[in-house]
């Protein structure tokens, strides 16, 4: 597990150097020799939202680690809503929902375009009930936003007559909810005024730095310099990076961070100073990491896109106050238009997978999971998803950032 997550953070380092080189049109070699499954539907190619859903290699580099070894998959539960809806009707998955008190089941999905049909990015949208906003979001670079009736209550249906969709102060009463019974996402399309956004993207890496993540920082230090030639000059957006490292209560620290900076080298330097230690039990201070990620980095509200990669191998502690904090943070990320992209490693179980996918659903993000296709490291549970494409984790993370930066 340590080395696989090491490769994972090495990939983060790769992406940081990718960002320092710039990013407009991505092209990846896709030269992994393992098995590729058919790619899942792509949000970027059509409906709901963004990119497609779908032991380290010791060779060269500092510490003997090389890049491009770890493999991963991606699965977007909004794109593949029918699959997720079926899981919600499964007794085990219903148990995970009640265990972690997260219920992503009913939402209004909006697609915003201007008079010319171009996506409207950066528009504030809210789901209103009884005069109060129950969920707030910001349309992403594809013009989409997900407005949830709740994540904290066990409900399978809601009456649209009880709600109003508010987009930049204009109210809309004619819409449909997506529920576990609809079988597919109901896309509510509205023509609205375009919004002025900055051609910029903020990318945060929120990283578990407890002892079980042992090799990740060594991997990261070793591989940061290897990515420039991989992606090169492929991004026109202004890119800022920031990081949060976290451990657990009683450790040397709970969280520490480096704020967003356009100089990627400063983020690299901060990461280079970090080491993995502490922990001891399975659960970690995920809730504190989410809080720090949304509150401490200095997000650019005018940027076209904002994304937080949550890299971890363990869930939060299961206490009511902690789970409530996670719910509140996910709602805040959505309100600020920050996509959470969990990246899960070998330590997680099915309950944690459910929780991480809930984080992604709540913020119109996507779920990334390490696979066994590379044949190295500890074994990983098979993600409960449909067909997906196996990719090098390095390329997958870079692809997502570039897709969000378009």
Image (cartoon, rainbow, N blue to C red):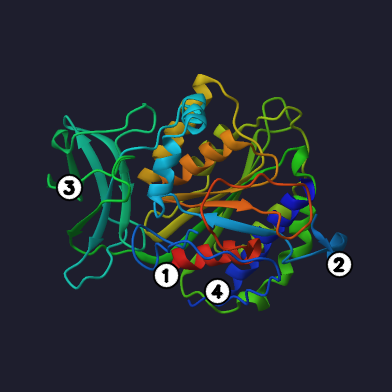
Residue 317: quarter of image: top right
User: Going from the N terminus, do you reach mark 4 or mark 2 first?
Assistant: 4
Q: Quadrant of the C terminus?
A: bottom left
Q: Relative to 246, is 351 on the left or the right? A: left
- Disc number for residue 22: 4
Residue under label 2: 59
Mark 3 lies on a secondary structure that is loop
Mark 2 lies on a secondary structure that is loop
Residue at image coords 28%, 64%? 196
As rendered, which of 92 and 65 lies closer to the eye?
Answer: 92
Residue at image coords 46%, 27%? 101
Mark 4 or 1, closer to the camera: 1
User: Going from the N terminus, do you reach mark 4 or mark 1 first?
Assistant: 4
Residue at image coords 66%, 30%? 283
Q: Relative to 253, is 63 on the left or the right? A: right
Residues at marks 1 and 3, CA–CA distance in whole angstroms: 28 Å
Mark 1 lies on a secondary structure that is loop
Pinpoint residue 128: horizontal percent, then vertical percent.
21, 37
Mark 2 or 3, closer to the camera: 3
- Disc number for residue 406: 1
User: Going from the N terminus, do you reach mark 4 or mark 3 first?
Assistant: 4
Residue under label 3: 175
Q: Tell me the crowding category of disc 2: few under 14, some 14 to 19, or many 20 or more residues within 10 angstroms, Cα based.
A: few
Pinpoint residue 15: horizontal percent, then vertical percent.
62, 64
Q: Quadrant of the N terminus?
A: top right
Residues at marks 4 and 2, CA–CA distance in whole angstroms: 27 Å
User: Going from the N terminus, do you reach mark 2 or mark 3 first?
Assistant: 2
Q: Are marks 4 and 3 in contact (CB under 8 Å)?
A: no
Residues at marks 4 and 3, CA–CA distance in whole angstroms: 39 Å
Q: Tell me the crowding category of disc 3: few under 14, some 14 to 19, or many 20 or more residues within 10 angstroms, Cα based.
A: some
């Amino acid at each position: 597990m340590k080395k696989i997550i090491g490769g994972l953070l090495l990939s983060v380092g790769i992406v940081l150097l990718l960002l320092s080189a710039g990013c407009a049109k991505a092209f990846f070699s896709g030269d992994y020799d393992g098995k590729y499954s058919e790619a899942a539907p792509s949000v970027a190619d059509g409906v709901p939202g963004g990119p497609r859903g779908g032991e380290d290699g010791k060779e060269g580099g500092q510490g003997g680690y090389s890049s491009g070894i770890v493999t991963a998959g991606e699965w977007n539960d909004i794109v593949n809503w029918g699959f997720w809806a079926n899981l919600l009707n499964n007794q085990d998955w219903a148990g995970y929902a009640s265990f972690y008190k997260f219920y992503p089941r009913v939402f209004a999905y909006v697609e915003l375009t201007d008079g010319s049909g171009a996506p409207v990015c950066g528009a504030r949208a809210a789901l209103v009930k009884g005069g109060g906003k129950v969920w707030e979001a910001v349309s992403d670079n594809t013009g989409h936003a997900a407005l949830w009736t709740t994540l904290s209550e066990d409900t399978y249906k809601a009456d649209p007559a009880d709600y109003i969709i508010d987009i930049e102060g204009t109210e809309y009463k004619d819409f449909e909810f997506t529920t576990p019974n609809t079988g597919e996402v109901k896309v509510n399309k509205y023509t609205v005024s375009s919004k002025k956004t900055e051609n910029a993207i903020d990318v945060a890496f929120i990283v578990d730095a407890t002892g079980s993540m042992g090799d990740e920082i060594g991997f990261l230090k070793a591989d940061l310099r290897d990515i420039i030639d991989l992606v090169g000059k492929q991004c026109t957006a202004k890119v800022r990076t920031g990081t949060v490292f976290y451990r657990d209560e009683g450790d040397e620290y709970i969280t520490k961070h480096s704020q967003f900076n356009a100089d990627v080298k400063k983020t690299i330097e901060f990461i280079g100073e970090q080491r993995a230690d502490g922990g001891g039990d399975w659960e970690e201070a995920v809730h504190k990491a989410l809080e720090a990620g949304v509150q401490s980095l200095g997000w650019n509200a005018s940027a076209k896109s904002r994304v937080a990669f949550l890299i971890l191998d363990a869930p939060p502690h299961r206490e009511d106050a902690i789970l409530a904090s996670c719910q509140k943070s996910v709602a805040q990320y959505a309100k600020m238009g920050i996509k959470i992209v969990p990246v899960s490693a070998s330590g997680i179980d099915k309950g944690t997978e459910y929780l991480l996918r809930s984080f992604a659903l709540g913020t119109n993000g996507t779920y990334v999971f390490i696979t066994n296709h590379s044949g190295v490291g500890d074994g990983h549970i098979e993600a409960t998803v449909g067909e997906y494409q196996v990719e090098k984790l390095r390329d997958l993370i870079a692809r997502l950032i570039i897709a969000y930066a378009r």
